[in-house]
Image: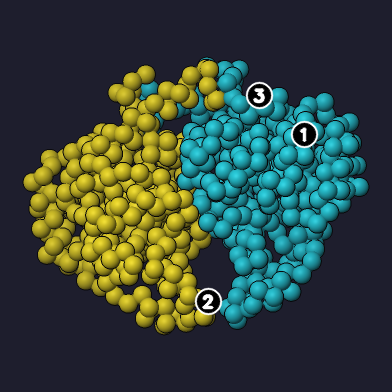
Chain colours: A yellow, B cyan
Amino acid sequence: MTERDSFRQNRVCDLFGIQFPLIQAGMVWCSGYKLAAAVSNAGGLGLIGAGSMYPDMLREQILKCQQATEKPFGVNLPLLYPDIQAHVKVILEAGVKIVFTSAGNPALLTPVLKQNGVTVVHVVPDVRFALKAEASGVDAIVAEGFEAGGHNGRDEITSLVLIPQVRKATQLPLIAAGGIGTGAGMLASMVLGAEGVQIGSRFVCSDESSAHPAYKKLIVNAGPGDTRLTLKELAPVRLLKNKFYQEVEEAYAKGASREELIALLGRGRAKKGMLEGDLEEGELEIGQISGAIENILPAAEIVKEIIHDYQALRLEINHPQSRF
Amino acid sequence: MTERDSFRQNRVCDLFGIQFPLIQAGMVWCSGYKLAAAVSNAGGLGLIGAGSMYPDMLREQILKCQQATEKPFGVNLPLLYPDIQAHVKVILEAGVKIVFTSAGNPALLTPVLKQNGVTVVHVVPDVRFALKAEASGVDAIVAEGFEAGGHNGRDEITSLVLIPQVRKATQLPLIAAGGIGTGAGMLASMVLGAEGVQIGSRFVCSDESSAHPAYKKLIVNAGPGDTRLTLKELAPVRLLKNKFYQEVEEAYAKGASREELIALLGRGRAKKGMLEGDLEEGELEIGQISGAIENILPAAEIVKEIIHDYQALRLEINHPQSRF
């Protein structure tokens, strides 16, 4: 068995026209065209994170990505922004062929995107949203578990439990997300029923990520248990436990109201932390897998390492003299 | 490749002298000798759950288990009970050879158990406790993730993330727990670095479990997202969201103090719910995987099904025409 035997009947590879079913998550403040193009050029699927871009910036990033790669790439579009139609206009005008939607109702944009020939994928935290996404006509689903960084579901279902649940509920191509950053995590997710993986945190610590260098370094130094899901009254979000997080905890201890939490969060905290490198006052969105990230590498090296380790484990499983 | 090729170099099988590296968790109110013996007779390792037994009851259960199986079995001993030395005396006098300790400091009992020739395994929720367990001289470690039922760690690390962390931190034989109830879950855990699995919730819904029939039925009917980790100020515990859980939530909403939560919890709620079948007032400890449990089977059938599905997936992974 060789690497060439892998992914021969893989619907995620077929759907996007890619070599490896490995998708780089389109994250706020980290995922510009440089990262997306690097991942796509390495055989995965890169996504531009539109969640932190005004429409003009998104247009510029898409055009630059088209120049930087001839491979397929996509855009991640969180559905909670007020000027979402302006983003859609940019995406369609620029000829983007793949859109991942998240954080909202998949019925909102799926029809218009599909009518314009776009392949649409929706990110869900539970079976209920997976069925809503399927009903809205998406082409594939990302099932994202509790361990994922950034915004998260309310039922706190972990990837190990969630992937088989969603696999059972729908026949659509299924991509796993949350807690995955290695070849072992990728293979484990696929054993559970996924046909591909979406990886975020690991790519924050790539050379091409636009995250602030100080933030990347903080992640490399983070240990097990250094993230927490918080702000559940607003929208649950997984953060590194920095000074801002401690302030949130103190507010909880004093019985803060929803309004007080909103005031504490304020505006622009994610940008302040992740892009500008204010590690104390910023909101540092990252997944539990950050505890396992130990270096900053070119994105192509990350893809190569994950696929290499995936293949090595696949061989090991098959070996009669093994723990398996 | 056949079933006989499996687990040839598996340290968990070697350590306990068992056929499959599949351990049935020793759970309060569910795991008497009938369940433990049934799992051991089926080729796994059954554990008697001492956490809900007075010493006399534990002695009786051990003696009955010795009559019901010639295979190895063990006892799970939570370390938080005041009369723990009486339990140890019973265990040593009855000649139990395998003890899993949990919920406490592994340095407490590991030396005395080891001196008496007992194989000792400790259950941990994070790397820090794994290193403490190793330092105390245990023979193996169970790494239990956030998705597990009952008592849980404070860092909320999921199995997908925790297993590789603990694998990297220690060279000891490693057993994964939390969120596992199927062959796919077992194989995924082993891909992540475990050498065996401990399964609890699935065996609650076995014929031989001493859980109340109404409780078993409730689990079969439970859906995704029907459990929650709560009572974090006391000791974090994962429960089915029943009337008692709602009362806890209401207490939180009113800003209840630690003392008020202790008073609300009261005494004997787990027994009331899990053994006596009071589904409204009882504390119903169960893992997230409960959403995937759809029937009540003989324990031997559960073992057989998990191992069968594990083997089928192992074959599928290596098929050149597959999603892998």
Contact between marks 3 and 1 (CB within 8 A): the answer is: no
Please identify the quarter of the rendering in which residue B3 is found. Answer: top right
Chain ID for label 1? B
Q: Which residue is mark 3?
A: B14
- Identify residue type, mark 3: Asp
Chain ID for label 2? A
- Identify residue type, mark 1: Gln
- Identify residue type, mark 2: Ala
- First reached walking from the N terminus: tag 3 or tag 1: 3
Please identify the quarter of the rendering in which residue A214 is found. Answer: bottom left
Vertical arrangement, residue A308 with respect to residue A122, above or below: above
At a point 39% along the width and 60% down the height, the residue shown is A240
Q: Is residue A78 left or right of residue A70?
A: right
Q: Is residue B301 visible?
A: no
Contact between marks 2 and 3 (CB within 8 A): the answer is: no
At a point 44% along the width and 56% down the height, the residue shown is A226
The residue carrying pointer 3 sits among few (fewer than 14), some (14 to 19) or many (20 or more) residues within 10 Å by Cα, namely some
The alpha-carbon separation of the residues under discs 1 and 2 comes to 46 Å
Q: Which residue is mark 2?
A: A253
Vertical arrangement, residue A8 with respect to residue A178, above or below: above
The alpha-carbon separation of the residues under discs 2 and 3 comes to 49 Å
